[in-house]
Amino acid sequence: VKNLKIEDLFVATAKSTKVNTSGSITGMPDAINANYNLKFNIKSSKEDLKSLLPDSIIPATIEVPKLVQVNGQFKGKMNSFDAKAFIKTSFGNADATVKMNKENYTASANIQAFNLGSLLKDTALFGVVSLQAKAEGSGLKKETIHGKVLVNIDSAELMKYNYHALNIDGTIVNEGFE
């Protein structure tokens, strides 16, 4: 198969996992250089994810949300693409955009009322967080990374205290952050 057109592929598995996708893939079977134009909607549960994924994929320090839904799209090749994802979970919601061109990238994320403590299994230290983040840079290895990061924290619960209007503006070079 050199070119694949997906009109409306629906897959249901386990107890409640549903995957719906449409789009096209051209230039196969070379998956790295193929061109993808896909839209997807994935819904699953904690129970299903634990049964479908290998144990090694989710660290013991991470709690899987009871419900997970991801809607998104991916356009481009594996190393040069535009991607968007809208994520709803029982811990809170997030959306993210990534534009990648070989080793150059821009990314943004918006996280609203996300219970970080539940995700990290540490509700004594972490609570609910809302923030916006942007990153722009180049390099994919710690030795070559050079980027700018801007994070605006609307609110964050840490050690049962509420913090508001925190900003982080810095540069990452190799393994350092300024």
Image (cartoon, rainbow, N blue to C red):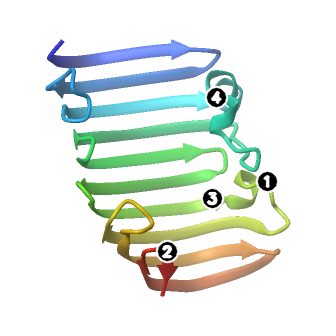
Q: Mark on residue 175?
A: 2
Secondary structure found at label 4: helix
Instruction: Identify which residue is drawn at 30% across, 33% down.
Output: 39
C-beta proximity under 8 Å, tags 4 and 3: no
Which quadrant of the figure contains the N terminus? Answer: top left
Q: Mark on residue 49?
A: 4
Q: Quadrant of residue 162?
A: bottom right
Task: For marks 3 and 1, give the one nearer the viewer.
Answer: 1
Q: Quadrant of residue 56?
A: top right
**Three-letter amino acid code of the residue under disc 4:** Leu
Give x and y (percent) for residue 105.
Answer: 29, 62
Secondary structure found at label 1: loop
**Three-letter amino acid code of the residue under disc 2:** Glu
Closer to the chain start, of discs 3 and 2, is 3
Would you name the residue on which mark 3 appears? 114
Task: For marks 4 and 3, give the one nearer the viewer.
Answer: 4
Task: For marks 3 and 2, give the one nearer the viewer.
Answer: 2
